[in-house]
C-alpha cells in the first residue's frame, strides 16, 4: 500500500468525515459537526501558533517590504513594489541570486545522486549495514559551525607551494590535477560551497531512498524475476518507478534548506561578496546597514522562491489525492 | 462522547498551564538568578577571546571590587567585528529592552542609534567626571553629534600600521620599509622578483577594506582623506582615481587564497617569515605577543606607506541606552570605563592605548609605547572601516563596492559605486 | 500496522558474491571520504596551539595534549546543560504535538483540513533571519524572552509543520478499520488515539525526535536572539570560543566534537527505530 501512495503531503487515501448517524436533520447535522469538531479543537493551538508566529510575522515582513522605511528613522509609507524592482538593478543582488541557483542545483543534485547511490549499494543488505548507515548519517548530527571550521581548512585554495587541506592531500597522493581553488573560483565557486552541504545531507537522503527501495514488495520483484528480468532490470522497471514520492520529498526538503542557506556560507567564508547569497545580503541589510525595507524585500523574494518550488507540487498532490 | 470532549478540554488546559508555568522563569532579560531588587548591569560586547576577553575581565574585576553589590552580566557574543552582537542588540533595542550598556565604535557607527533616539546623551556625565579635559580634543570632537556626546571611549587602536619581516626584506634587498605608496608598490615588485615569499599577506574581504582605507590615506594625505567623509565630498576626482589604481595594483601582489584566510593567519605569515608585508591594525601586536614572537627580531612595524605622521584611529566605546533597566549601575560601569584605573587595567591586556591622556605610561611597553608617543604627536584621521567616519549604510555600501571590485578589478565601476555611496549615504 | 521490512535475497551465485564484494569496496571508499573531516577534527583537537594550524592538518599530533579538550569542556559545560534543557523537552513536546496534529489531519478530518495542512507546511519555508526582529518584539511583549522556556516555545512552534507532516504520513498507513472498530466500541477521539494509534507510533516518534533534537541542539540563530548569557545553549558558546584574537583551533575543534556528541548519542539510541519509521512511510508517503 504505502509505495503507491502519492507523496509528501497526503500520505493516504482521502478519508471521509466520520459517518453521521441517522435522525432528524438538525440533530444529524449537530452530530456531524460533533463528529469532526473535537479534531478541530485539538488542532486549534497549533493553528493559532502558526497563524501568529508564521503568518503574522510574514505579514509584518511584507508590510515592511512594501514601505519606504530604508533607514531606522524613515517613515513607513506604502511605496508598492519599488523595493522589489530596484533590487534587480543591482549588481550585488544579481550575483547573489546566481550564486543561490548554482548552489541549489549542485547541492540538491549532488545530495540526491549520492544518497540514491549509497542506498542502492546498501539495498541488498550488507555485513555491518548498520555501521555503514551510521557513518553516512553522522554528518547530519554535526552543527554547521563545526562543519564550517573543518571544511574551511579542507577547501583552502592556496597554490601548490603553499597547499593545505584537500589540495595538499591530492598532491601527496599524486592526484595534483584535482587541486583547484574551490569556493574562490570565479564562476563555479558556489558549487564547491555545496560540497560540505552534500556531505551533511547525503546520509539523510540515503535513509529516505533506502526506505523507499525496501518498501517495494518483494513479491513484485520476484514476479519480475520470474518473468526473466535481470536484477538491474528489476530495479529499473519495478523499483525506480515507485520512487517518485520519495524523490519529491527529498527534493522539497533539500530545496528549501538550500534556498535559505546562511549558516554554512557564513561559517565557511564569513560575509564576502565572492560567496554572497540572498540570506547573507538580507542579514547585512537588516543588521549592518539598518535598511529594514530592503532586507524585508529580499526575505520576501526568498519566501517566494521556495513557494514557487513547493506550491505546484502541493497542488498536484492535493489534486491527485482528491482524484483517488 | 461528552466525557471524551471534557477530557480533551482538561488535557489542553493542563498542557497550557504547564507551558505557562515554564514561562514564568523566562521573564529575566538575559540575567542569571539574583535576588529581586539587586543591582545588575548587563553589558553587550564582542570581546570573547584572547587579550580582549582578558582585558575586559580585568576591568570587570576592578568594577566588582569597587561595586560588590552590582552583579555584572557579561553578554559578549563573538562574531567578526560584532556582527552577531550588533544583530541581537538591534532586536533588543527595537523591542525596547536594551542592555544596560553596549560596546560600539566611537563615531559615525553610533549615528543610527542616536538618530533613532536610543542613546542617552552623556554631556553631564562628561562634566561630572571632568572627561573633556582628559580625552584629546580631536577625539571628543569626532564623537560629538549635533553638540552632544553619546559614548565613553575606552581605548584607541591604530589602523595604519605596516607589519613587515626583517628577514624577507633583507632577502629581497630592501633597506627599510617603504614610506610612500609608490615606494610600496616597487617594494612589492622587488619581493616578488627576488624571493619566493608572499609580497603582501591579505585575508578575507574586510581586510581588503582595511587595506583600502590605508591606501586612500597614503595617497590623499590626512586632509584629503578627511575631506572625503564630509557631505558633498567629491569621490569622482583624479586623486581618488589614482588611489584606486594603486589599490588595484597592490592587490595583484597578494595571495590567491586571501578570501579563505583569517586576518590572524594573514598576519602570522609575516612573523613566520613567509610574507614580507601585512597592513593590519595594531591589534596584531597583541596577537603576535600571544604567539610569543619578539618585535625587532620576528617582525618590525612602521606607519603604513604614505601615512607617517597620521594616526588613523578607531576607538571602542561604551554607551548608555535609553530605558536601561538599571541606569545607576550602568553609569557606574561607564565611570569604570572612563577611569584611569579601568583603562590602565584594560588596555595593556587588550593591546591598545588608553583614550585618556593621563595614563600610566610605564604599563605600555614595546609597540604600545611607540603608539602612545605617536598618538600625542600625529595628525588624526578617523578610520572609516572601523566606524569613525562612515555611518552604517555608507559602511555597507563601500564594503559591497570593494567586494564587487575584488571580483571584477574594474576601477571605473568601483569609483562610480563609491561616488554613488557617498551621494546616498553621507551625513 | 504494516511495516514492510523486506528481507534481502541471499546471494547464491558467485557472480552475486563478486558483485557483493564490489559493493562492499565502494561502500568502504565512501566511508573513508565521509570520515576525512572527522579525522581532521579529531587530530587537531589533540594538538597544542602551535601545531594546530591548517598547514599541518593531515599530520597526527607530534605532541598529544588534552588542553584543547579541557578548555573546551570548561567553556562548554554550563552551556551543554542548557542545550539539554532545551532539546529534550523541546523534542518531546514537538513529538507529542506533531502526533496529535498528524492524527487529526489523517484520521479525524474536518472541512478544509487539507488547506490547513498546506498552510502549516508553508510555515517551514520562512527565512528565519527575516522575522527575528518582530519575533523578539512579540516574545518581549508576552514576557517569554530571555530564557530556555521561550526558546523551547519558538522551536516547538516552528517545528509544528515538519512534525505534523511526518506523523500525518505515518498515520495514513494505519488502516481505518482499526479506528472504526474502536469507535464502535464507544471510544471517542482521544481514547481511539490512546488505544489504537499511540501504541503503534514508535518509529514515527523516533524520526521526529531525532529531527527535532538535532535541529534544536544545533540551532544558533534562535538561541542567540532569544536567550541571554545565563541560558545560552552550546552552539552560542561554541561560537564564542572563536574569539577575535588568537583562534584556538585545537580548542575549537574539540568543542565542535563535544557539542555534536549528544546528537550522535541520540542517533545511536534511536537509529534503528529511525529506519523503521522511514520505511513505514513517515517521510515518503
Image: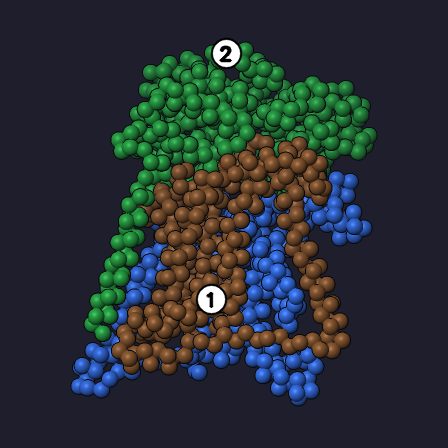
| Shown colour of chain C | brown
| Shown colour of chain A | blue
Residue beneath the point at 53% across and 32% down = B49
Q: How many marks?
A: 2
Q: Along the horizontal axis of the image, is B59 left or right of C19?
A: left
Mark 1 surroundings: few (<14), some (14-19) or many (≥20) residues within 10 A = many
Q: CA distance from mark 2 to mark 1?
A: 68 Å
Dot 2 falls on a residue whose secondary structure is loop
| Shown colour of chain B | green
Q: In terms of depth relative to the viewer, which is nearer, A224 or A284?
A: A224
B193 shown above or below B295:
below
Question: Residue A99: image x %, image y %?
Answer: 59, 54
Q: In terms of depth relative to the viewer, which is nearer, A282 or B16?
A: B16
Foreground: disc 2 or disc 1: 1
Residue that mark 1 sits on: C203
Residue beneath the point at 75% across and 71% down = C18
Q: Which mark is drawn over residue B360?
A: 2
Dot 1 falls on a residue whose secondary structure is helix
Q: Along the horizontal axis of the image, is B210 left or right of B78?
A: right
B314 shown above or below A5:
above
Amino acid at each position: 500500500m504505502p509505495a503507491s501512495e502519492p507523496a509528501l503531503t497526503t500520505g493516504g487515501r482521502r478519508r471521509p468525515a466520520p459517518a453521521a448517524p441517522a435522525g432528524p436533520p438538525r440533530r444529524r447535522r449537530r452530530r456531524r459537526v460533533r463528529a469532526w469538531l473535537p479534531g478541530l479543537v485539538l488542532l486549534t493551538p497549533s493553528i493559532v501558533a502558526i497563524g501568529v508566529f508564521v503568518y503574522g510575522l510574514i505579514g509584518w515582513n511584507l508590510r515592511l517590504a512594501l514601505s519606504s522605511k530604508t533607514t531606522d528613522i524613515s517613515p513607513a509609507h506604502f511605496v508598492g513594489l519599488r523595493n522589489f524592482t530596484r533590487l534587480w538593478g543591482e549588481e550585488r543582488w544579481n550575483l547573489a541570486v546566481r550564486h543561490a541557483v548554482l548552489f541549489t542545483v549542485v547541492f540538491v543534485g549532488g545530495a540526491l545522486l549520492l544518497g540514491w547511490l549509497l542506498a542502492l549499494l546498501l539495498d541488498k543488505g550488507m555485513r555491518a549495514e548498520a555501521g555503514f548507515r551510521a557513518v553516512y548519517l553522522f554528518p547530519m548530527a554535526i552543527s554547521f559551525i563545526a562543519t564550517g571550521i573543518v571544511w574551511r581548512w579542507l577547501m583552502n585554495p592556496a597554490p601548490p607551494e603553499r597547499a593545505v587541506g584537500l589540495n595538499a592531500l591530492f598532491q601527496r597522493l599524486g592526484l595534483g590535477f584535482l587541486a583547484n581553488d574551490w569556493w574562490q573560483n570565479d564562476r563555479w565557486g558556489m558549487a564547491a560551497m555545496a560540497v560540505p552541504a552534500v556531505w551533511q545531507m547525503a546520509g539523510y537522503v540515503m535513509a529516505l531512498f533506502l526506505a523507499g527501495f525496501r518498501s517495494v514488495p518483494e513479491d513484485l520483484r520476484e514476479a519480475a524475476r520470474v518473468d526473466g528480468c535481470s536484477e538491474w532490470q528489476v530495479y529499473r522497471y519495478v523499483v525506480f518507478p515507485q520512487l517518485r514520492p520519495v524523490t519529491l520529498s527529498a527534493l522539497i526538503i533539500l530545496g528549501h534548506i538550500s534556498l535559505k542557506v546562511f549558516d554554512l556560507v557564513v561559517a565557511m567564508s564569513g560575509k564576502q561578496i565572492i560567496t554572497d547569497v540572498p540570506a547573507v545580503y538580507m542579514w547585512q541589510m537588516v543588521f549592518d546597514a539598518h535598511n529594514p525595507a530592503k532586507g524585508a524585500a529580499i526575505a520576501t523574494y526568498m519566501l517566494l522562491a521556495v513557494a514557487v518550488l513547493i506550491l505546484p507540487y502541493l497542488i498536484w498532490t492535493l489534486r491527485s489525492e482528491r482524484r483517488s | 462522547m461528552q466525557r471524551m470532549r471534557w477530557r480533551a478540554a482538561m488535557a489542553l488546559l493542563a498542557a497550557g498551564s504547564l507551558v505557562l508555568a515554564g514561562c514564568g522563569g523566562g521573564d529575566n532579560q538575559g540575567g542569571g538568578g539574583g535576588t529581586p531588587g539587586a543591582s545588575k548591569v548587563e553589558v553587550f560586547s564582542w570581546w570573547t577571546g584572547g587579550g580582549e576577553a582578558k582585558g575586559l575581565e580585568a576591568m570587570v574585576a576592578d568594577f566588582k571590587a569597587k561595586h560588590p553589590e552590582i552583579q555584572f552580566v557579561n553578554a559578549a557574543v563573538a562574531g567578526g567585528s560584532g556582527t552577531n552582537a550588533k544583530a541581537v542588540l538591534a532586536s533588543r533595542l527595537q523591542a525596547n529592552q536594551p542592555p544596560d550598556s553596549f560596546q560600539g565604535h566611537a563615531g559615525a557607527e553610533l549615528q543610527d542609534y542616536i538618530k533613532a533616539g536610543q542613546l542617552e546623551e552623556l554631556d553631564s556625565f562628561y562634566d561630572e567626571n571632568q572627561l573633556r579635559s582628559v580625552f584629546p580634543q580631536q577625539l571628543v570632537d569626532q564623537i560629538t553629534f549635533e553638540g552632544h556626546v553619546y559614548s565613553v571611549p575606552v581605548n584607541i587602536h591604530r589602523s595604519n600600521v605596516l607589519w613587515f619581516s626583517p628577514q624577507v626584506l633583507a632577502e629581497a634587498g630592501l633597506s627599510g620599509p617603504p614610506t610612500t605608496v609608490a615606494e610600496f608598490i616597487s617594494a612589492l615588485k622587488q619581493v616578488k622578483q627576488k624571493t619566493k615569499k608572499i609580497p603582501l599577506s591579505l585575508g578575507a574581504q574586510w581586510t581588503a577594506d582595511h587595506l583600502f582605507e590605508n591606501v586612500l590615506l597614503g595617497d590623499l594625505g590626512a586632509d584629503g582623506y578627511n575631506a572625503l567623509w564630509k557631505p558633498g565630498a567629491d569621490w569622482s576626482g583624479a586623486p581618488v582615481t589614482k588611489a584606486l589604481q594603486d589599490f588595484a595594483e597592490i592587490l595583484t601582489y597578494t595571495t590567491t587564497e586571501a578570501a579563505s584566510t583569517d586576518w590572524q593567519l594573514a598576519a602570522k605569515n609575516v612573523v613566520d617569515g613567509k610574507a614580507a608585508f601585512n597592513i593590519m591594525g595594531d591589534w596584531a601586536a597583541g596577537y603576535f605577543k600571544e604567539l610569543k614572537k619578539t618585535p625587532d627580531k620576528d617582525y618590525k612595524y612602521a606607519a603604513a606607506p604614505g601615512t607617517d605622521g597620521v594616526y588613523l584611529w578607531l576607538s571602542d566605546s561604551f554607551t548608555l541606552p535609553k530605558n536601561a533597566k538599571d541606569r545607576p549601575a550602568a553609569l557606574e560601569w561607564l565611570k569604570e570605563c572612563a577611569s584611569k584605573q579601568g583603562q590602565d587595567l584594560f588596555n595593556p591586556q587588550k593591546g591598545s592605548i588608553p583614550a585618556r591622556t593621563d595614563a600610566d605610561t610605564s604599563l605600555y611597553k614595546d609597540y604600545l609605547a611607540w603608539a602612545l608617543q605617536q598618538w600625542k604627536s600625529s595628525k588624526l584621521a578617523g578610520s572609516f572601516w572601523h566606524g569613525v567616519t562612515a555611518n552604517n549604510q555608507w559602511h555597507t555600501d563601500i564594503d559591497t563596492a570593494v567586494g564587487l571590485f575584488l571580483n571584477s578589478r574594474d576601477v571605473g565601476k568601483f569609483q562610480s559605486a563609491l561616488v554613488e555611496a557617498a551621494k546616498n549615504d553621507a551625513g | 500496522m504494516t511495516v514492510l521490512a523486506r528481507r534481502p535475497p541471499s546471494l547464491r551465485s558467485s557472480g552475486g558474491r563478486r558483485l557483493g564484494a564490489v559493493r562492499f569496496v565502494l561502500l568502504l571508499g565512501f566511508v573513508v571520504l565521509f570520515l576525512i573531516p572527522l579525522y581532521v577534527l579529531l587530530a587537531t583537537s589533540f594538538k597544542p596551539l602551535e601545531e594546530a594550524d591548517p598547514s599541518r592538518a593531515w599530520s597526527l599530533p607530534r605532541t598529544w595534549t588534552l588542553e584543547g579538550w579541557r578548555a573546551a569542556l570548561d567553556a562548554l559545560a554550563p552551556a551543554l546543560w542548557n542545550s539539554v534543557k532545551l532539546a529534550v523537552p523541546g523534542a518531546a513536546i514537538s513529538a507529542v504535538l506533531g502526533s496529535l496534529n498528524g492524527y487529526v489531519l489523517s484520521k479525524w478530518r474536518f472541512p478544509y483540513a487539507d488547506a490547513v495542512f498546506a498552510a502549516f507546511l508553508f510555515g517551514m519555508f520562512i527565512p528565519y533571519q527575516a522575522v527575528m526582529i518582530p519575533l523578539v518584539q512579540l516574545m518581549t511583549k508576552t514576557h517569554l524572552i530571555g530564557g530556555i522556556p521561550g526558546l523551547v516555545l519558538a522551536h516547538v512552534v516552528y517545528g509544528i509543520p515538519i512534525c505534523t507532516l511526518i506523523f500525518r504520513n505515518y498515520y495514513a498507513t494505519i488502516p481505518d478499520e482499526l479506528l472504526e472498530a474502536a469507535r464502535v466500541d464507544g471510544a471517542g477521539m482521544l481514547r481511539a488515539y490512546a488505544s489504537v494509534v499511540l501504541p503503534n507510533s514508535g518509529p514515527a516518534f523516533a524520526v521526529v525526535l531525532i529531527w527535532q533534537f538535532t535541529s534544536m541542539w544545533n540551532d544558533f540563530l534562535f538561541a542567540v536572539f532569544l536567550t541571554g548569557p545565563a541560558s545560552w545553549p552550546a552552539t552560542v558558546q561554541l561560537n564564542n570560543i572563536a574569539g577575535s584574537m588568537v583562534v584556538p583551533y585545537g580548542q575549537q575543534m574539540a568543542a565542535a566534537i563535544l557539542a555534536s556528541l549528544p546528537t550522535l548519542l541520540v542517533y545511536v539510541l534511536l537509529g534503528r527505530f529511525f529506519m523503521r519509521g522511514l520505511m513505514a512511510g513517515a517521510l515518503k508517503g
